[in-house]
Amino acid sequence: MRLSRRRTGGVLTYTHYIVPLLLAVTVSGLLATYLWRRRHVPGGVAFSVLMSAVTVWLVAYTLWLVNNGEQAKDLLAKLEYVGIVTVPVAWFVFAAQYTGHGRWFTPARLAALAVIPIATLALTWTNQMHGLIWATYTLYREGGVMLSDKTYGAWFWVHTGYSYVLVIAGTLLVIRWVLSYSHLYRYQATVMLIGVLVPTVGNVLYVFKLVDLQGVDLTPLAFSLSGLMLALGIFRFRLLDIVPVARDTIIEGMRDGLLVLDVQDRVVDMNIAAQRITGLSSAKVIGQPITRLLPVWDEVLGASRAGSGKRTEITLSTDGLQRCYEVSLSAINDRREVATGGMVILHDITEQKRMESELQESYQRELGLRQELEGEIKKRLEFTRALVHELRTPITPIMLSSEVLATELKDEPAISLSKSIHRSVTHLNNRIGELLDVARGEVGMLQIDPQPVDLTQLLRDVSEDMSPVAAAQGKIFRLDVPETLPTLLADAARVRQVVINLLDNAFKFTPQGGHVTLMARHQNSSMVVSVQDRGRGMSPEELQQLFKPYQRLGGFRERASGLGLGLALSKSLVELHKGTIQVESEQGKGSTFSFTLPLKADTQAAEQDIAATQA
């Protein structure tokens, strides 16, 4: 590098440059520090490196202006290049990462980007040996400021061209992004473009000497303006808080179609799913009115403005198939809540509609089956009622006649025959009643009439009625109840029916001379009534079938009469009282049937439960 001194005319004071340079140094330094703290966001590290390089460039150039020593100026001019070679690379990397192309930068590619900057830096510090950066370098004094006049070597133009390529490439990425998404990010885009274009223009003017700048490099001065613009973008428009890099990942990965509209309802953007749904590429759709794509747009717009939440559905041909889509519209507003466009979502509801159709068909089938079943139940109940009526019609006069004969006849065996006829007819009448009750229970029509009941007296009455039956069959019957028991809330007639069923069952399957005991006790909030016999007992297999209708167990029970309805009916009646029935049995030792009923203290709750059951 050759140094010389010359003096030119004109008046120039260095304060014209120092003040804005100091401002630029302050702004860029603070931004570099702040951005390093935000390095976790996409492009944050590159942006911080960019502003750090600008700071180094500005500091070195500011010191170069205020220092008049030739050796110091030579050193500071070389230090400037630490920032000069870093800025273009950092800008390109930041622009790519910010606009969603950060995946380009593998370690190998980053190293390749740094080859020319590193070579330029090395050649700058050894320029006196080859002059590849500065062919000539002349210092002169102007208005108290030591300035320079220089011509550039061959490598300078290599690096300059490389730098401009990187700056232009990064700028084009931002411009492309602006054109695609300016309706969403126009403030951020504006400050970014100003921030990069102003220093670039200043550098072109200085390097190519397009205007007489009196030896002053406008590039660092331009950074004072770009620093202010970037500060405005960061703190005013949240430049690093609203980063569009997730667009390709999120929007393009959406299964729903997305169309972005401007204020004139023209399509300005659409994702891949929307292109697939409409069968049109973005090149054919961008700039077209949304009405050309969605004929029901007026309906969508009306529903959105009315805020009714009404779904608008359309059918489109997608991949050669007719599919149904739900269309929704959301407004896009700026920071002042002024509408800048809209966002249309096309949600595929074809599968949902298919399932709804299948569900409706299933419901209709189920409704038909239910109506058919209810019809069959009604027919069965009517048949049972008719059967009961037909059976009871001839039985009633037989019962009355046998009862009259038993009182009128004086001689045997006529008296015994009349009594036998009366017992048999009464037994048949009871079986007919059970048959009707079971049929009612199966269709939910069996009901009870709960009233306060004196259980002690009820059991004594049953004992008086059943003692002759037990004696006639050669069974030993015993009543074991306390003198007084709490009052029950129950249907006395139905409770009596259950107890008689259990006793009748015990009498049937207890051998002559065997014992049958009717017991009652107070247990917690319920009364427990038990019938104990000393018969042969039952096996576990028999116990599993015990309370099922029309079940008659084998072995000894084959000789028993009846339809197998008594225990099933007893279980239904006890459960209508919100009670339970259970049995304990051991083969060879007998069985104990027990059922529980709520006490009068639980009258209100029991009444509510029973009313709900019968509703």
Image (cartoon, helix red, strand yellow):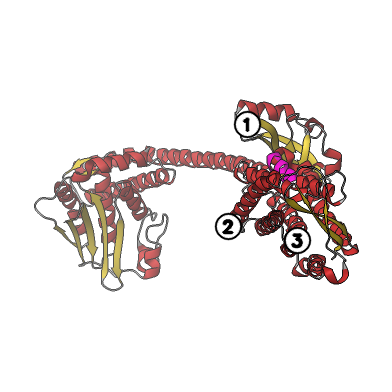
Residue 142 drawn in magenta:
no
Q: Is the residue marked by circle 3 packed among few (<14), some (14-19), or many (20+) residues within 10 Å? A: some
Amino acid of disc 2: Arg
Front tag of 2 and 3: 3
Task: Tell me residue 117's x, y (percent).
Answer: 79, 65
Measured in 3D between alpha carbons, the distance from the residue under mark 2 to the one under mark 1, in whole angstroms, is: 46 Å
Query: On screen, 431 above or below 404?
Result: below
- Which residue is identified by label 3? 77
Q: Position of residue 256 (x, y in %)?
A: 71, 46
Residue 464, disc: none
Is residue 187 highlighted in magenta?
A: yes
Q: Name the residue under label 2.
A: 37
Q: Quick one: SS at disc 1?
A: loop
Q: Is mark 3 on a helix, strand or loop?
A: helix
Dot 1, crowdedness within 10 Å: few (<14), some or many (≥20)? Answer: few
* Residue 468 place in picture, x, y as percent: 18, 54
Snapshot quadrant of residue 138: bottom right
Task: In the rendered view, tell whether residue 128 sits above or below residue 298.
Answer: below
- Viewer-side residue, 572 vs 493: 572
Circle 1 sits on which residue?
310
Q: Which dot, 2 or 1, sits closer to the camera?
A: 2
The magenta span reads 186-195
Q: Are marks 2 and 1 in contact (CB under 8 Å)?
A: no
Residue contact at pointers 2 and 3, CB within 8 angstroms:
no
Nearest the viewer among 112 and 361 is: 112
Query: Quadrant location of the N terminus?
Result: bottom right
Disc 3 from disc 1: Cα separation: 69 Å
Q: Which residue lies furthest to the right in this view?
A: 154
Q: Is mark 2 on a helix, strand or loop?
A: helix
How many numbered discs, if any?
3
